[in-house]
Image (spheres, coloured by chain):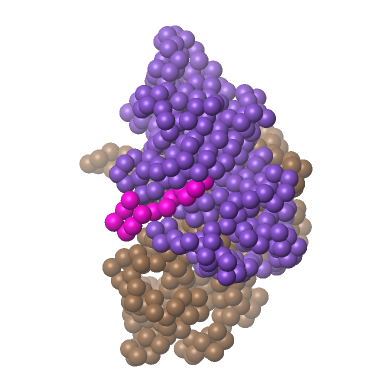
Amino acid sequence: MAKLLEIEHLHTQFFTSAGVVEAVNDVSYDVAEGETLGLVGESGCGKSVSALSVLRLISWPPGRIVGGSIRFLGKDLLKLSDAEIRRVRGRQIAMVFQEPMTSLNPVLTIGLQITETLEHHLGMSDAQADARAVELLGMVGISDPERRLKQYPHHLSGGMRQRVMIALALSCEPKLIIADEPTTALDVTIQAQILELMKDLSKRLGVALIIITHNLGVVARYADRVNVMYAGKIVEEGTADQIYHNPHHPYTIGLLASVPRMDQHRGKRLVPIDGQPPDLTKLDNGCAYRPRCRWAIDRCANEIPPLEHVGDGQKAACFRSHELGDEARAVS
Amino acid sequence: MSAQAATAHTTRSPRSVEKGETLLEIRNLKKYFAVTEGVVVHRTVGDIKAVDDVSFTIRKGETLGLVGESGCGKTTTGRCILQLERPTAGEIVFEGTNLERLDQKAMIPMRQKMQVIFQDPYSSLNPRMKVGEILGEPMRVHGIQPDRAKRHKRIAELLAVCGLNPKFADRYPHEMSGGQRQRVGIARALCLNPDFIICDEAVSALDVSIQAQVINLLEDLREEFDLTYLFIAHDLSVVHHLCNRVAVMYLGKVMELAESDELFDHPMHPYTRALLSAVPVADPKIEAERQHQVLPGEVPSPINPPSGCVFHPRCPLVVDSCRAEIPPLRELRTGHWVACTQV
Ligand SMILES: Nc1ncnc2c1ncn2[C@@H]1O[C@H](COP(=O)(O)OP(=O)(O)OP(=O)(O)O)[C@@H](O)[C@H]1O
Ligand SMILES: Nc1ncnc2c1ncn2[C@@H]1O[C@H](COP(=O)(O)OP(=O)(O)OP(=O)(O)O)[C@@H](O)[C@H]1O
Ligand SMILES: [Mg+2]
Ligand SMILES: [Mg+2]
């Protein structure tokens, strides 16, 4: 499938009193048209910053994109003028955040927020925008859309607000939606409703999705391909099947062994990853996962392992990934 | 760790309840919160039925899971057990003592036996106290270790038991990671030698790799100190892993209660079935084959809960009688209780 988004050597830093935070540290990946990419990793590993960087929503100070390129439909987003990137945002690439309350304007009705977007980006008339807004709310499963359009965000439940956010994201028929923990704040049955909705719409409308989450189950259910992030870098990349059934990076292996699974025997003891993620202001010239890695060797302290092919489109950033396979599978 | 555990328990009083016997019994517990209107003169306009006629028992040594969606009354149930909330009706019997009948003074030794670990390691610890004080203060107040030197030794032991360096006694909560803070919360719950601990979303805020460390710790401590847990959580995978029995709540009521394996292998209540189906499993092959039953609608407001069975507006099996009559919990298989007339 044709490449929609191509990120190369993206590097985003925060300049804080505690030092320079290497939030996104030489990240490269692609998103094909219409596919769903899962971005997983622990809190603070750079998932949100990497997504915000795509839309150049990193504010200075303290943050800055210091290097790399982000090609979207052939154009480098990092080279666009401010006016040009604003036209890309919302129009071609939309975002859905964890907490819809912070992205919806509390003093405007739902209707006004949607129609304003339609009029601004697509130049629709009031009447056209009203009709389209009703259609959009229907599409995301909100009943009685005419009445809902007159309501304010605080009148709606969390799940309903997230549906509105998705309607807003879809309003300009974007090519790509970046959903940053879109359901983390919601109950499981509502989470399932929202994710099924997003997946269904993405298939029907051919919109590519980047789902950012720390929930390995969500990724297993919804993603075609998966990027695993650790300490600002992608450490493994592959299809969902490869990542879950043939992981090649010790961190991926560790993650899979640490989640309790409903489909497995209850008595099975979890295998946690010892220690904690590193301080992103104090990275050295070695692999950032090394202090927690049971397979670390001397070389890992002196060289950063590059993300390299390990076969069949799968990539891993580990000097020992080729040796790991079997032993790793035995552990997880 | 065993040697430490032994010293940690020298102050324990002999236990009256044996493993497997009923430690805690909750009978027909109700907790209603008044909904008021008006700024100067408050008028009660209705009740939030946070917990509405809930009964269950917890046996010594077991872990009972309490699951259900946000607002279904899990935390309120826990707070009523700890007497942090005065029940509207019902009884809570702990080690044979009816807590409702105890006065403040008689409650103090009971408090010591029941502890709680909260979800949020960031806000549940006093930010102005060092870890050593956070653990030492309750011991001093309850007269558990009046001697200062011994108390310090005990704090060091507790930290070690919870996998923390004893030097952390001199740190403030903000100088620690989320996982470390949660361990301090666990150490604090242990410092009074409790029999029973309520874990209210105790691992929910943690990243998976850290969450696994804390889950293993809770398992080890349960073994080591003969603890009984009420494990409140919305993450069903964690509940499945950690609990012997599970109660599923919906809008203030228990919908289903069974042994963990039984509940996860043979869920009977339509709500439990939907809930389990909504939880994604971390395996794309299994996910590709699984039925995804999506439950329509949202959890109704507990202020005006639906008549009859509170689940009926979202229920795929609903019949007329469900709108009128509250289904009682019936034992459909041994130890497997279901509040539904249609299964
Ligand atoms: N405004 C900021 N100032 C300083 N550091 C920041 C800022 N925003 C993010 N960071 C740092 O950048 C790193 C990456 O943050 P990011 O928000 O991308 O993490 P994440 O993977 O999305 O985590 P989570 O799962 O918690 O949302 C973190 O270490 C974070 O502390
Ligand atoms: N002090 C209070 N005053 C009024 N209403 C309350 C109070 N405490 C809880 N409630 C209400 O009682 C209901 C049950 O709340 P509770 O906190 O027990 O739910 P929960 O199952 O723990 O939910 P969560 O998963 O979100 O923690 C909710 O509707 C809540 O708004
Ligand atoms: Mg984030
Ligand atoms: Mg709660």
Numbered-mark total: 0
* Chain letter, colour brown in render: B
Span highlighted in magenta in the image? A15-27
Residue A12 location (% of width, % of height): 42, 45
Q: In this view of the protein, which residue sits in the foreground, B68 or B85?
A: B68
Specify whether A83 is left or right of B313: left
Q: In this view of the protein, which residue sits in the foreground, B325 or A260?
A: A260
Question: Is residue A25 found inside the magenta-colored segment of the image?
Answer: yes
Task: Considering the whole magenta stretch, tell me its main secondary structure.
Answer: strand
- Quarter-of-image position of residue B27: bottom right
- Quarter-of-image position of residue B229: bottom right
Residue B163 location (% of width, % of height): 50, 75
Q: Residue at x 73, y 45 (%)?
A: A312
Rendered-image quadrant of the N terminus of chain A? top right
Find chain A in the image and tell me its colour. purple
Rendered-image quadrant of the C terminus of chain A? bottom right
